[in-house]
């Protein structure tokens, strides 16, 4: 039992973090009143929901294109349809199988099943993640500046340990350069991947803007982009499974406290974004069984490496 707890400590911590975050969401719902949240949801027309979901789908295609570009420029002769299938499968596993397997693991297993180079495929996944985070840094000031007084009280500013923060930033830059060594010789691929990430951010925030407007809220588009970027970095903190609960809480907090919309509207918005992401990943269910089967075969003792 002790060995099992030791081996699964990280998963257990994330599982507990997810439960706590979901519990806080339940408390928020109870505090605001279910009727108020349903009233907010009923303000959205079917066409507005359809438009917002279309923007989410377009953001997914930007993510697919980003990984496709990284794979192709790295020498992996993958087709766009294969990259599409693998990405949707990874998204589906992250949303519906979060307790057993990660989306990036599924993407890597699928790429290997198709016969593509393991090392380059793995490096492309790391680069895909890093480019996503790096691109979000460009829009972070649009949210961090107006949210600074909420996130960092004035009394705490003087106690910030800036040198360690700078050191961590420098370490991140060095790790990023090491990962990008394959693509630094092909800057056009990195630029194209960055553009795809900004397209993903654009379409995601357009979906949010449609929902905010439909729910009767008023926020500038740049503020929406900035607050979304803060929520993105918060969900990168490994305290829950796939950011479940944490993303919803951070979006609710930021859009209500900084964006100025009501907590009920912000919570409705956060839940809708999660639901849209889950629905948009459903095509991955078609390809997942074959990839999981191949992964099981690799785990068998007599399987070949």
Image (tube, rainbow, N blue to C red):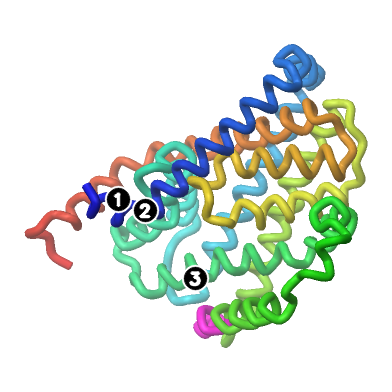
The residue where tag 3 is placed is 72
CA–CA distance between discs 1 and 2?
6 Å
- Which segment is the magenta one? 177-183
Q: Quadrant of residue 244?
A: top right
Percent across and percent down for residue 64 are: 55, 55
Percent across and percent down for residue 110 are: 35, 55
CA–CA distance between discs 3 and 2?
37 Å
Compared with residue 202, is residue 276 higher up or lower down, i.e. above or below? above
Tell me if residue 186 can be seen. Answer: no
Binning the other alpha carbons within 10 Å of mark 3 as few (below 14), some (14 to 19) or many (20 upward) gives some
SS label for mark 1: helix
SS label for mark 3: helix
The residue where tag 2 is placed is 9
Q: Nearer the viewer, mark 1 or mark 3?
A: 1
* Observer-nearest of 242 and 300: 242
Q: Quadrant of residue 50?
A: top right
Seen as rendered, the residue at the extreme bottom is: 185
- The reply to whether dot 1 and dot 2 touch (C-beta < 8 Å) is yes
Residue shown at 81% from the left, 35% from the top:
210
Binning the other alpha carbons within 10 Å of mark 1 as few (below 14), some (14 to 19) or many (20 upward) gives few
CA–CA distance between discs 1 and 3?
41 Å
């Amino acid at each position: 039992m002790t060995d099992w707890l030791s081996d699964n400590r990280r998963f257990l911590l994330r599982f507990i973090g997810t439960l706590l975050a979901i519990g806080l969401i339940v408390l928020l719902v109870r505090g605001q009143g279910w009727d108020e949240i349903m009233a907010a949801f009923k303000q959205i027309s079917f066409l507005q929901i359809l438009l917002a979901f279309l923007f989410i789908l377009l953001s997914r295609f930007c993510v697919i294109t980003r990984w496709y570009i990284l794979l192709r420029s790295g020498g992996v002769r993958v087709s766009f349809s294969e990259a599409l299938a693998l990405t949707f499968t990874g998204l589906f596993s992250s949303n519906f199988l979060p307790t057993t397997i990660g989306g990036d693991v599924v993407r890597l297993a699928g790429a290997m099943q198709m016969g593509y180079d393991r090392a380059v495929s793995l490096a492309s996944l790391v680069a895909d993640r890093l480019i996503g985070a790096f691109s979000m840094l460009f829009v972070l000031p649009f949210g961090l500046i107006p949210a600074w007084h909420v996130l960092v009280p004035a009394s705490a500013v003087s106690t910030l340990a800036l040198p360690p923060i700078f050191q961590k930033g420098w370490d991140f830059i060095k790790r990023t350069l090491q990962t990008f060594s394959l693509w630094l010789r092909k800057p056009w691929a990195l630029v194209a991947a960055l553009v795809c990430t900004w397209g993903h951010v654009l379409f995601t925030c357009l979906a949010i803007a449609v929902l905010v407007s439909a729910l009767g809220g008023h926020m500038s588009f740049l503020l929406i982009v900035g607050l979304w970027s803060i929520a993105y970095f918060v969900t990168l903190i490994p305290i829950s499974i796939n950011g479940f609960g944490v993303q919803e809480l951070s979006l609710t907090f930021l859009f209500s406290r900084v964006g100025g919309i009501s907590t009920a509207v912000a919570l409705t918005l956060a839940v809708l974004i999660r639901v849209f992401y889950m629905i948009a990943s459903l095509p991955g269910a078609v390809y997942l069984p074959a990839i999981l089967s191949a992964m099981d075969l690799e785990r068998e003792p007599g399987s070949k490496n």
